[in-house]
Image (cartoon, helix red, strand yellow):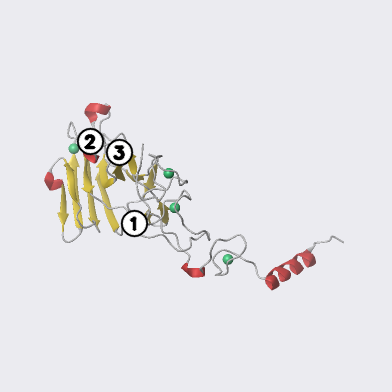
Amino acid sequence: MLACGCGARSELLVEDNYRGIERCGDGDVSEDEQCDLGDDNEDRPAIELLNGVLRRAVMPVDRSESVLAFYDYASESSHTGFEERTTSRMFLYRDRQTARMSLILHHGIDEDSSGQTLTHGEVEMDLSGIPEGAGVELADDNPDEMLLVGADGARGRWEFWRNSDGAVIGPVPLPGDWTIRITTDLRDGIESWDYVDADGEPIELTTQLDGVLRAFPTPSRCRLDCTVPRCGDGIVDGGEICDDGNLVEGDGCSPDCATLDGL
Ligand SMILES: [Ca+2]
Ligand SMILES: [Ca+2]
Ligand SMILES: [Ca+2]
Ligand SMILES: [Ca+2]
């Protein structure tokens, strides 16, 4: 007769149920948890990106130059280095010298400087939740192609031949308390849409659903992994503008996570 071991296993399960299995999210703080607020645990990063089931913390691309210098509008095109021939890209950009942040959108690529040809492109975007005080800092190529509409909206209607089109909207505050929603229609030439994160890596998005960028002005009291947010833990939480994982000054992020110092 073969021993199945079933009896021993069910005895173990009964024992576990009897003891109760501790886990993050059950509202009890166990030894290996810093906190546990049960259903009130939440992640509140400084900025998050949502697109359907996608939900992740993101940060701006940081450079030590103004957003307009970085966009480098010439030859009727952007030259950020993130251009792709058949891709529409969006990302937050921050000038490290002033900590001023903007939203950059661009589609396609400049034929003159890249040698790549996209004969015709057409993209439409409708944005809502543009933060108060933000405006169109640059419209590539024509002011009519990116307009503020209504109380907090913006409308992009771009058509382009052998060059890129796009726009810069700003300033976008950080820390912030805003939710920018972007509806995208790739009408011709452009085939994909993505968000470029701080490290330059694109995150693929679907145009079937809105892309949403959201800023939290304060950290959560307890994260979903039962850790307590703090400055210096390497995670840029709501209310922080940086967190380099230390409390050292002069290395790019101040010990209170409120200033881009040094560098
Ligand atoms: Ca727990
Ligand atoms: Ca253009
Ligand atoms: Ca932190
Ligand atoms: Ca630091």
| Occupied quadrant, residue 2 | bottom right
Q: Quadrant of ligand 2?
A: top left
Q: Mark 2 or mark 1: which comes first in sequence?
A: 2
The residue tagged 3 is 86
Residue 159: % across, % down: 18, 42
Label number found at residue 106: none
Tell me if 80 is positioned left or right of 41 in this view.
Answer: left
> Crowding near pointer 3: few (<14 within 10 Å), some, many (20+)?
many
Residue type at numbered disc 1: Ala
User: Do the CB atoms of the residues marked 2 and 1 lie less than 8 Å apart?
Assistant: no
User: Which residue is disc 2 drawn over?
Assistant: 69
Residue toward you, 228 or 69: 228
Disc with the residue nearer the chain's start (1 vs 3): 3
Q: Where residue 186 sits in the image (x, y, percent)?
A: 27, 47
Is residue 139 visible in this depiction of the protein? yes
> Which quarter of the rendering shows the N terminus?
bottom right
Instruction: Give the position of the C terminus as an image quadrant.
Output: top left
Q: Which residue is mark 1?
A: 215
Q: CA distance from mark 2 to mark 3?
A: 24 Å
Q: CA distance from mark 2 to mark 1?
A: 25 Å
Q: Residue at x 50, y 61 (%)?
A: 224
- Cβ of mark 1 under 8 Å from ligand 3: the answer is no
